[in-house]
Amino acid sequence: MCDIDLLIHAKDISLCRAWLQENGYKELDLSKWAGDDFKYMFAKDYKEIEINIEIHTKLFWHTDSSVISANTSEKSEGYDFLTLEENFVHLVGHLGLQHTLYKLNWFFDIYLLVDKYKDEINWQKVEELVRELRLVRSYNLILWILNSYFYDKKTLNPIGVPSKYIRILVT
């Protein structure tokens, strides 16, 4: 694991930063660009391990989306959580858009989520989120890889692009 990402309400930034600092985390100076102005990085050494925590007020730099936000409908013990659909779309955007397929360990997270919950995920809701967040290319590419290398047959359907065209683009 590289870091722990926490999505919080923008109004809670000061509270979260203070809590992390009170618990021994040091805020790291990040060279900020427009794509990073919604996150803060903290680090703490614990025994021989460095723990890195990023706090985010939104999930994607390219959209001011209220589609996926800390206001989601899933709750547990007083905390908000992303729904299955939001979590899947976040993982797709994180790997495909933000990190351009750089680390395949994140791809494996997507595979594990889909493998465990593919019958419970509302795929229509996923497609709506993907379109609204402008993640269609990342989504289609990741589905093509899942279908090509992890499933025996075409299990997941990309949006609007026949899989043969995606295959041509990546091979």
Image: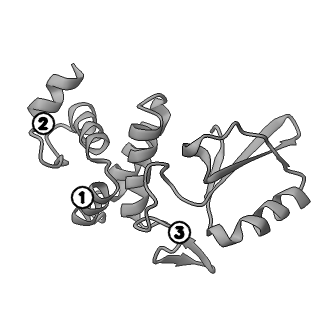
Spatial separation of the CA atoms under disc 3 and disc 1:
20 Å
Q: Residues within 10 Å of mark 1 (few under 14, many from 20)?
A: some
Query: The C terminus lies in which quarter of the figure?
Result: top left
In the rendered image, residue 143, in percent from the top left (x then y), is placed at: 25, 42
Please name the residue that numbered disc 1 is placed on.
Answer: 127
Which type of secondary structure does the marked residue at label 2 adopt? helix
Q: Residues within 10 Å of mark 3 (few under 14, many from 20)?
A: some
Which type of secondary structure does the marked residue at label 1 adopt? helix
Q: Give the amino acid at mark 2.
A: Ser
Spatial separation of the CA atoms under disc 3 and disc 2:
32 Å
**Foreground residue, 4 or 26?**
26
Looking at the image, the residue that sits furthest to the top is 171
- Seen in the picture, residue 85 relative to 144 is either above or below; the reply is below
Q: Which quadrant would residue 29 be assigned to in this image?
A: top right
In the rendered image, residue 19, in percent from the top left (x then y), is placed at: 83, 64
Please name the residue that numbered disc 3 is placed on.
Answer: 81
Spatial separation of the CA atoms under disc 2 and disc 1:
16 Å
Residue occupying image coordinates x 90% and y 60% = 22
Please name the residue that numbered disc 2 is placed on.
Answer: 163
**Foreground residue, 4 or 133?**
133
Q: Is residue 92 left or right of residue 120?
A: right
Q: Earlier in the sequence, mark 2 or mark 1?
A: 1
Q: Give the amino acid at mark 1.
A: Glu
**Foreground residue, 42 or 36?**
36
Q: Earlier in the sequence, mark 3 or mark 1?
A: 3
